[in-house]
Image (cartoon, grey):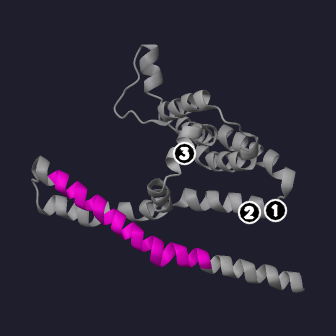
Amino acid sequence: MRIELTGSFLIYSGYALLRGRARVPALLAGLVGLAIAGNFSLAAFCGGALLFELRGWLRPLPMWGTLLALLGLVLGGTYPGHADGPGLADAILSRLGADGWREAGALLVIIAFLTTPWLRDLFERPALQHLGALSFPLYLVHVPLIVGPAAWAFVHFAPLGVAGFALLLALTALATFLLASLFLVLVERPVLDGLHAVRKWGRARLAEA
């Protein structure tokens, strides 16, 4: 959460201070500078905002976009337990999914969605759009459920066995989606609507001044 808060403050502050064409070079400088400093998470915030600013320049590239999506998944994928070995393949596999590679892979996947018509059409379907709306609530609620009631049930009813563990996973996933849906309706949307109303009121007051 600290990284998300810092990154959001970085981007929103930059957008508040910079206008028009100044944003692209500033975001590019932030992306390169933070990456060189080893702060890949914050560099990814700049990269995402940079893609947003340059989205109008991107053109449909069905084949290359698909390849970019696959490359992004490989670069950002995590291969746990694969130790570095004497061969080139072992050296590469041991680094995939690490800091820097992971963020680069995520940016490539975003570019792929922006340039690949069939991927865009797929993720514009209502069910996946709703899942996207739930993404932030899911991010917030899944860890408390896992480390709280799910972990308690795992210890209290141990040993669960394969069937019991599968049932616990299914119940935890169901509870996560239900709680995320409540959070979306009762917290996120009212807060965003309130902020929109405050911003609209503030702009009106500034226009009158």
Q: Amino acid at mark 3?
A: Asp
Quadrant of the image for the C terminus? bottom right
Crowding around mark 2 (Cα neighbors within 10 Å: few <14, some 14 to 19, many 20+) is few
Relative horizontal placement of residue 164, taking residue 20 as reference (left or right):
left
Q: Residue 154 occupies which quadrant of the picture?
A: bottom left
Crowding around mark 1 (Cα neighbors within 10 Å: few <14, some 14 to 19, many 20+) is few
Q: Amino acid at mark 1?
A: Leu
Q: Secondary structure at mark 3?
A: helix
Q: Which label belongs to residue 153?
A: none
Which residue is tagged 2? 13
Magenta segment's dominant SS is helix
The answer to whether the residue labelled 1 contacts the one labelled 2, judged by CB atoms less than 8 Å apart, is yes
* Residue plotted at (47% across, 60% down): 130
Which residue is tagged 1? 17
- Percent position (x, y) of residue 131? 45, 57
Find the residue positioned furthest to the right.
209
Q: Amino acid at mark 2?
A: Ser
Crowding around mark 3 (Cα neighbors within 10 Å: few <14, some 14 to 19, many 20+) is few
- Percent position (x, y) of residue 65? 59, 32
Q: Residue 17 occupies which quadrant of the picture?
A: bottom right
Q: Is residue 147 visible?
A: no
